[in-house]
Amino acid sequence: MAVEDGTCVMVPRGYHPVGAPHGYDLYYLKVMAGPVRQWHFNNDPAHEWIVKK
C-alpha cells in the first residue's frame, strides 16, 4: 500500500511495514481502541533477521 503526504490509512490486519528514505521525515502513529487494549506484535518471518540479536 503506497501512501502520500497527508494521508491516513487503516490496516486492520496483516503486517504494517513502514519506512522512509534517508533525509525524509516519518511520523507513524498507532492507536488502540476497544475495551481490551493489548499490543500483539509479530514480525514478518521473511524479515525477522533484521531484529535478531
Image (tube, rainbow, N blue to C red):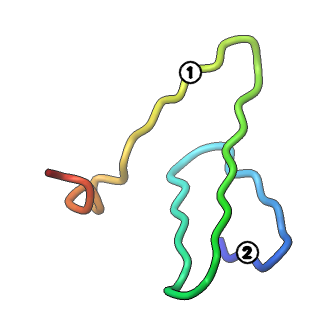
Question: Image check: 42 left or right of 37?
Answer: left
The type of residue carrying mark 2 is Val
Vertical side of 25 occupied by 8: above or below: above
The type of residue carrying mark 1 is Gln
Q: Which residue is mark 1?
A: 38
**2 or 31: nearer the eye?**
31
In this rendering, the count of numbered labels is 2
Q: Which residue is mark 2?
A: 3
The structure residue drawn at horizontal position 65% and vertical position 57%, both measured from the top left corner, is: 28
Q: Position of residue 8 (x, y in %)?
A: 82, 61
- Label 2: few (<14), some (14–19) or many (≥20) C-alpha neighbours in 10 Å: few
Secondary structure of the residue carrying tag 2 is loop
Q: Position of residue 51 (x, y in %)?
A: 26, 55
Q: Position of residue 32 (x, y in %)?
A: 70, 31
The structure residue drawn at horizontal position 61% and vertical position 83%, both measured from the top left corner, is: 24
Q: What's the distance in space between the residues labelled 2 and 1, CA to CA?
A: 27 Å
